[in-house]
Amino acid sequence: MGKIRPVLILSVRPGDADRALVSYVIRTTSERGSAYEVQHKARGMKPGAFDAQGLGTTDKSHLIKCLGLVDKATLALIEERVCAWLGLPPPLPIDRPGLPDC
């Protein structure tokens, strides 16, 4: 079993016909100053960063618990860095009324 670490879920909730998978970006405390990192501070956590080079997908049964939510500005930066890492055009700003809560 690998190291347990906080992640930010990037995917939407799967529908009934979809696989029960979630895509995520890891949060690390070993910052390297990479252009693909977004610094993050949260109560109860060591200072760290979300690393767009650390993307993954897993079965949702591997998730343990919700630790909180990131603000819209942080989420927008993470999306921008993920797109840059994947060589995709920058995301268009959209309203997200249906963001999941914990």
Image: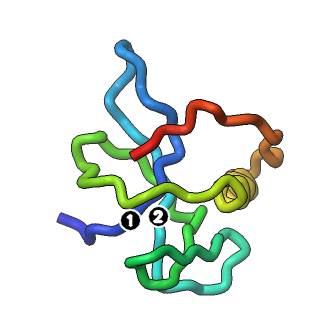
The structure residue drawn at horizontal position 67% and vertical position 53%, both measured from the top left corner, is: 72
| Crowd band around label 2 with a 10 angstrom C-alpha radius: few (<14), some (14–19), many (20+) | some
Assign a secondary structure to mark 1. loop
Residue that lies at the very extreme toward the top in this rendered image? 17
Q: Is residue 40 above or below residue 15?
A: below
User: What is the x, y in percent for residue 90?
Assistant: 81, 48
Q: Quadrant of the N terminus?
A: bottom left
**Three-letter residue code for mark 1:** Pro
The structure residue drawn at horizontal position 47% and vertical position 69%, both measured from the top left corner, is: 27
Q: Is residue 92 above or below residue 18?
A: below
Residue 19 location, quadrant: top left
The structure residue drawn at horizontal position 65% and vertical position 71%, both measured from the top left corner, is: 38
- The residue where tag 1 is placed is 6
Q: Is residue 64 left or right of residue 95?
A: left
| Crowd band around label 1 with a 10 angstrom C-alpha radius: few (<14), some (14–19), many (20+) | some
User: What is the x, y in percent for residue 46?
Assistant: 43, 84
**Three-letter residue code for mark 2:** Ile
CA distance separating discs 1 and 2: 6 Å
- The residue where tag 2 is placed is 26
Assign a secondary structure to mark 2. strand
The structure residue drawn at horizontal position 75% and vertical position 51%, both measured from the top left corner, is: 87
Q: Is residue 102 above or below residue 45?
A: above
Q: In this view, does 6 lie to the left or right of 36?
A: left
